[in-house]
């Protein structure tokens, strides 16, 4: 292209590039010098960057750079600083008995604030961000507790979980009465109607209440109690109240009795430190349903 | 048919004219004295105000003027403001703007000439320059001669003092954001937070650059006020004016004497250029009202000195109005009216805004309540069928002392109220202890029996009462069923 000579353009006082496309010529307007210099400077800068910061992948590892910088190490420093900023407040929370924490406004505020964050990070996937639960995952705002709603019981549930792999986990299972052949389909329907009657829900036409009661006493009362009030030691829900974990319609209850229910809550001890579990306990308890 | 059009060459002149160095000459007189006095007052207030103490009782900062960013509080003598009361600052800004307009309607660019920080610091920097390098003529001569050892020493001294003033300016700035005596100690012993040093460095740089190097360029190219001012001014406003009717035709002193002896008119201006030499923005006031002119009045002092020496009446350059220029030309007596629709309107607006602000300040509630209904879940059905709504309630105690308040809730019939972590008081409503000057967050649970009408949401009023001090605040929310 160098054989093209730029010609002077009178209107603008500039020369053209010398190219001509169908008679259209282009003014020669080079990039400003400062721009070009800045561009070269960024190249030089990049070389310095390679030397100082981790940049090039190697076969086994990577070039760490002369400063040995690592963003992961920065995170560790930040976390350590965070602990320093919190200044032992979490330690104070960890040392205080649960009942005391709720009485101390400062500790209660700290526990609730910390608990809310930890809940969002760890518990919300199952229990929901507001702990309102879902089918099979208990609502923690209400006053119905499978494994007990006192501070100590909530803490134990969070620590060890329910039907988790932990040795101290809550144990107790709802058997699959239908699937395992302990009850036949009509029997299940009868006892399901009886269970509905416990909490004042309407029953199906022609249902035999006496048979239902007998079936309940023979099969269910050992865990749910004679009156169906449940047992927090075994995670057996209260069948006389308005709160149903899986649903209160007949079909759902029949399904529950047929296949059993064994929801799992993981153990958090070891994954969360004791003070954090305490904060979480305070938060869950303060949602409103705590006993 | 379209004909090719020859491109036309437009030349509106450059939007920016390169800076011409100004060498203002020393001057003395009435306006110079006013400027010195105002400079002392302005700088005195700026540098010393952070050290003024104001007792607010135990636990509160005792600095009269303090912007407490970490605790988000602003203290001004007896006033303490919370972030949500930022509208007071809006009011102050409106007042400041109106005052500026009023100043302009009465005395032109009084702000620019005497009070603007750019003017005050530039004036101070000029004084330093003059002290070290000498007056206008010497400075111009030295600059033309190039670098000598003495010149290097002088320049080093000048810039060192400039930087020292600039550094002090930045230093005083950060004192408004922290307890001044403590911070001074920390700054000296290098214990102060890095942010303090960074801000001092930033303000040192801006002061040094703006007052030492950019000077009148700031007024000309960076400040919007000259342009706004030009649109706001009118023929009644006092402006520093060269009285053309008296000054023209400019003649030499000798020629003027000759003309007057012959009974012919002669201008008073002897074209001595003193008004130009003393001008800090480097203009010729005799060219009339200009945007560059900050109206500092120094040319009045310079001209008065000359007029006195040559035995002519002073105030050839003076604060004058367009109206009077026209009236003098028409042979009518001068008039000056300070009370006119424009000034009355400005004063009226200032009084109105001031009154509204004062009323708001005197009646600001020291107790407030904010209620936020839980959104997830909105309502909870309990095992006995009753319905519970949870609220986050924030109580604001703006008093300088702690107090006990009662929270009562007027909502669904037969509802029970419980504050998490608190026992109900004897009256049945929870009593809450509020710390001095802080917010307290509560979780309030309202439980209504299952029998309530759950079709629509019910109105709910939360009220917080301090019977001792007679303060009360309330907030409205709703109670909803699942």
Image (tube, rainbow, N blue to C red):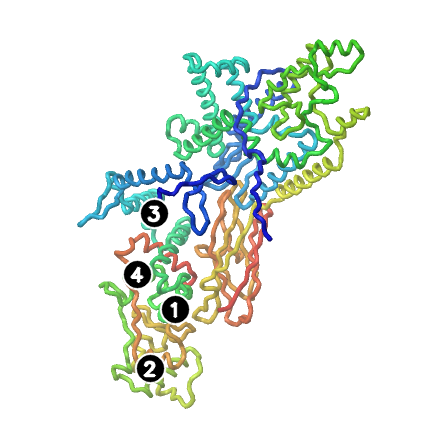
Q: How many marks?
A: 4
Subunit under mark 4: A
- Residue A286 falls in which quadrant of the image? bottom left
Element assignment for label 2:
helix
Element assignment for label 4:
helix
For mark 2, does the 10 Å Cα neighbourhood hold few (<14), some (14 to 19), or many (20 or more) residues?
many
**Labels 3 and 4 in the same subunit:** yes
Give whichever of B318, B10 is nearer the camera.
B10
> Which residue is the site of mark 4?
A156
* Residue shown at 39% from the left, 31% from the top: B192
Distance in Å between CA atoms under marks 3 and 1: 34 Å
For mark 3, does the 10 Å Cα neighbourhood hold few (<14), some (14 to 19), or many (20 or more) residues?
few
Query: Nearer the viewer's eye, disc 2 or disc 1?
Result: 1
Element assignment for label 1:
loop
For marks 2 and 1 on the same chain, the one whose residue lies earlier in the sequence: 1
Distance in Å between CA atoms under marks 2 and 1: 27 Å
* Quadrant in which the N terminus of chain A appears: top left
Distance in Å between CA atoms under marks 4 and 1: 22 Å
Give whichever of A142, B103 is nearer the camera.
B103
**Labels 3 and 2 in the same subunit:** yes
For marks 2 and 4 on the same chain, the one whose residue lies earlier in the sequence: 4
* Residue shown at 47% from the left, 60% from the top: B374
Residue A274 visible (yes or no): yes
User: Where A8 falls versus B432 (above or below)?
Assistant: above
Query: Nearer the viewer's eye, disc 4 or disc 1?
Result: 1
Element assignment for label 3:
helix
Q: List x then y, in percent, for residue B48.
A: 52, 26
Distance in Å between CA atoms under marks 3 and 4: 20 Å
């Amino acid at each position: 292209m160098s054989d093209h000579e730029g010609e002077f353009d009178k209107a603008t006082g500039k020369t053209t590039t010398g190219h001509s496309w169908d008679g259209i010529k282009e003014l020669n307007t080079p990039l400003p010098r400062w721009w070009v210099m800045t561009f070269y400077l960024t190249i030089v800068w990049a070389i310095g960057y390679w030397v100082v910061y981790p940049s090039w992948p190697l076969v086994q590892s990577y070039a760490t750079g002369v400063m040995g910088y690592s963003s992961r190490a920065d995170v560790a420093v930040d976390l350590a600083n965070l602990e320093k900023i919190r200044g032992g407040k979490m330690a104070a929370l960890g040392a205080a008995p649960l009942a005391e924490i709720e009485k101390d406004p400062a500790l209660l505020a700290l526990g609730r604030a910390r608990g809310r964050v930890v809940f969002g990070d760890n518990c919300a996937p199952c229990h929901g961000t507001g702990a309102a639960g879902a089918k099979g995952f208990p609502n923690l705002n209400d006053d119905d507790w499978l494994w007990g709603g006192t501070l100590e019981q909530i803490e134990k549930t969070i620590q060890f979980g329910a039907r988790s792999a932990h040795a101290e986990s809550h144990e107790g299972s709802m058997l699959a009465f239908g699937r395992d052949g302990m009850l036949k389909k009509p029997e299940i329907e009868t006892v399901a109607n009886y269970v509905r009657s416990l909490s004042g829900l309407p029953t199906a036409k022609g249902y035999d209440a006496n048979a239902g009661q007998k079936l309940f006493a023979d099969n269910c009362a050992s865990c749910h109690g004679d009156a169906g009030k449940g047992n927090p030691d075994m995670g057996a829900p209260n069948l006389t109240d308005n709160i149903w974990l899986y649903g209160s319609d007949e079909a759902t209850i029949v399904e529950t009795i047929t296949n059993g229910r064994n929801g799992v809550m993981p153990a958090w001890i070891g994954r969360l430190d004791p003070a954090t579990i305490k904060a979480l306990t305070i938060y869950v308890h303060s949602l409103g349903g705590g006993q | 048919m379209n004909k090719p059009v020859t491109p036309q060459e437009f030349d509106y002149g450059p939007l920016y004219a390169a800076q011409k160095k100004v060498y203002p000459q020393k001057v003395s007189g009435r306006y110079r004295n006013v400027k010195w006095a105002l400079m002392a007052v302005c700088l005195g207030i700026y540098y010393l105000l952070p050290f003024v103490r104001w007792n607010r009782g135990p636990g509160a900062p005792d600095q009269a003027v303090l912007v407490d960013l970490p605790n988000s509080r602003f203290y001004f003598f007896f006033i303490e403001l919370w972030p949500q009361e930022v509208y007071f600052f809006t009011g102050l800004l409106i007042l400041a703007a109106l005052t500026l307009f009023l100043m302009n309607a009465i005395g032109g660019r009084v702000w620019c000439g005497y009070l603007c920080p750019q003017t005050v610091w530039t004036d101070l920097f000029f004084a330093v320059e003059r002290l070290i390098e000498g007056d206008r003529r010497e400075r111009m001569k030295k600059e033309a001669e190039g670098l000598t050892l003495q010149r290097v020493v002088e320049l080093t001294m000048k810039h060192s003092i400039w930087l020292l003033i600039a550094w002090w300016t930045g230093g005083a700035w950060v004192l408004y954001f922290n307890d001044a005596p403590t911070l001074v100690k920390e700054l000296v012993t290098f214990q102060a937070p890095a942010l303090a040093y960074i801000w001092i460095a930033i303000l040192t740089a801006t002061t040094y650059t703006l007052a030492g190097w950019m000077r009148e360029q700031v007024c000309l190219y960076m400040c919007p006020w000259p342009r706004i001012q030009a649109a706001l001014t009118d023929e009644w406003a006092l402006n520093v004016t060269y009285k053309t009717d008296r000054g023209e035709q400019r003649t030499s002193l000798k020629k003027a004497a000759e003309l007057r002896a012959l009974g012919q008119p002669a201008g008073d201006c002897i074209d001595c250029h003193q008004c130009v030499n003393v001008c800090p923005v480097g203009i010729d006031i005799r060219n009339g009202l200009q945007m560059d002119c900050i109206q500092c009045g120094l040319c009045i002092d310079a001209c008065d000195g000359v007029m006195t020496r040559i035995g002519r009446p002073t105030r050839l350059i003076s604060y004058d109005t367009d109206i009077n220029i026209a009236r003098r030309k028409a042979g009518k007596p001068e008039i000056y009216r300070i009370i006119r629709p424009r000034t009355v309107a400005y004063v009226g607006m200032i009084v109105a805004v001031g009154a509204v602000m004062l009323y708001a300040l005197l009646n600001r509630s020291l107790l407030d309540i904010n209620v936020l209904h839980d959104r997830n879940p909105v309502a909870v059905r309990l095992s006995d069928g009753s319905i519970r709504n949870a609220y986050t309630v924030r109580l604001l105690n703006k008093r300088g002392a702690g107090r006990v308040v009662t929270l009562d809730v007027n909502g669904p019939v037969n509802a029970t109220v419980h504050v998490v972590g608190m026992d109900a008081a004897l009256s049945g409503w929870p009593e809450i202890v509020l710390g001095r000057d802080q917010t307290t967050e509560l979780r309030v649970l309202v439980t209504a029996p299952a029998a309530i009408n759950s079709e629509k949401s019910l109105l709910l009023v939360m009220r917080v009462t301090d019977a001792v001090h007679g303060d009360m605040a309330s907030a409205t929310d709703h109670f909803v069923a699942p």
